[in-house]
Image: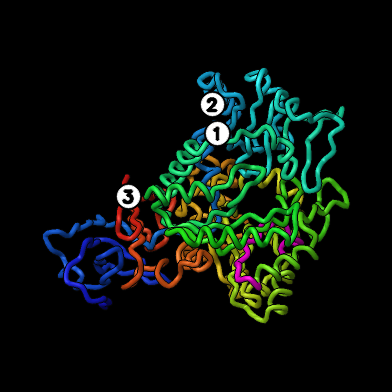
Amino acid sequence: MTERVEHTTADLVFQNGSVYRGNGLWDRYPVAVAGGRILNCGSDAGQLISQATRVVDLRGGSLVPGFQDSHVHPLLGGAALLGIDLSPVHSHPEYLTLISAYALSHQDTAVLQGAGWYGDLYPGGFPVRQELDAIVPEKPIILTSHDAHGMWVNSAALAAVGIDNLTPDPLGGRILRDHDGAPTGVLLDTAMGLLGKLMPVHDSAYLRRAMLAAQERLHSVGITSWQDAMVGHTDLGQDPLPVYEALIRDGFLTARVTAALWWDRDRGVDQIDELVHRRILADSLPGISAETVKIMQDGMIENQTAAMLAPYFLPPSTDRGPSMIDPAALTAATIRLDALGFNIHFHAVGDRAVRECLDAVESARKANGSSSGRHQIAHLDIVNPADIDRFAELNVTANLQMLWARRDTEIVERKLPLLGRERESQHFPFASLARAGAHLSAGSDWPVSDPNPLWAIYTGVHRTAPREDVHARGDEALTIPLEPAEALDFHTALDAYTLGSARVNGLDGFTGAIRPGFAADLAWIDGDISKGHHLGSSTVNETFVNGTTVFER
């Protein structure tokens, strides 16, 4: 079979490997690229080779469409790489070693920052301030958890912002306390905002370095486009939009970016005019668009801040978790945003939050008489069976974080006991959503979890962790699938990271597949993954955007 568009010679020709065209189709035909576009996918692509053509020998590996991450936080990830980066290790002693080394080499830094700790290493799931006090007693230190829903701080940080035994918990957040009521040094979800005045305001040079470090990391795993799921000022950091603007101006942004503008949950529909203005600003820049608004409706199950239909199972209580936005206010915002042509990217972990988001979209569909808005709900840790079919009915995309669907120690010990067996069976219902006809996209939520799409696809297919992941802790993570009936088939998972994410990123029709006329956004993988094998061990050799190399191993 041969497909092509007319052209005389190719700039690039890929040959001698498995080529994933999309929608489950693999072949071994050469692929020719000219002018940044796929020129020819067929047996005669080699006839377009000239002396100026670069011929890429795939050496038995795979050529796939560039992966698209539809839920990621690049500025946070890049800042973590520049700060106290705990993500490469998974042990308490190693954490302390990294923290000590960084503190020693940054003695002039007023507030030390880092990220990446896991709660499964600590009794009760959380570290305490005294461990940091022993290393850095005299100045604040702030370490964000790997899931970005908690901050571990020392006594100096608590004192600097006046958090003590009498400080109340904010709505949607918790200050963890000991038996005497004293803060232990961990703040969860909206309580992290209490540290706001202490968070350093970084200059433009630092933010630029952080974003470039993130871009390199994402390109290194074959990602060519992403949706930044937190564009605005938040409790976790500064607004990425000016950083993107500066990189575009100077010619350093090599990815395609969709900005999900942050919805301030402390305000209402009065902020919509500002979002429209920011959309106009972003859309005037090449390489970025801002047709999406990010709304965070709840927290996470492990912190008991996910919004659940029924109470948490342990300890026995009536606590069902908070809705961060009143459902009526959520509906009003969704109707207005939908009417203005915004796509909405909801964060919903608990089954009640998922239902509230679906209800809001249903109201918008009725009020505005349109089903064209590409709304999506990310995370979906628990979805009530009654709501599965509603995704397809309402044209709502299920945004999957596949790497989470496994039996890590942290999930087995901290999360599943809070759910109970009945809800455990509804945990990450990927296959149920696919069978019901829901659109699927995929995102890593990096730096919450590793950005490697191959690892995520492995877990989406097997519901166990790849052995190469340092955070795959506990024998069950590698050997016992998490609800195996919810496993995706290989091509469904792969398409979610390509065609599916291209759809919610607004890049479909010219990215997400290898077809004549499509952008030459490509990833060359060293292993042959055409049968769904070698996903954990394969790496990306080279990543291309518009036919130009943006990463080479």
Residue 478 seen in this snapshot: no
| Crowd class of label 2 (few under 14; some 14 to 19; many from 20; radius 10 Å) | some
- Location of mark 2 (residue): 98
Residues drawn in magenta: 339-354
In the image, is residue 44 above or below residue 311? below
Q: Position of residue 523 (x, y in %)?
A: 35, 56
- Using the numbered discs, state the Cα–Cα distance from disc 2 to disc 1 in whole angstroms: 7 Å
Mark identifier at residue 437: none
- Location of mark 1 (residue): 86
Secondary structure, mark 2, is helix
State the residue lying farthest toward the bottom.
369
- Location of mark 3 (residue): 541
Name which residue type carries label 2: Leu
In the image, is residue 64 above or below residue 101? below
Secondary structure, mark 1, is loop
- Using the numbered discs, state the Cα–Cα distance from disc 1 to disc 3 in whole angstroms: 26 Å
User: Which callout, 2 or 1, points at the residue further toward the start of the chain?
Assistant: 1
Q: Which of the image's four quarters has the C terminus?
A: top left
Q: Position of residue 130 (x, y in %)?
A: 71, 22
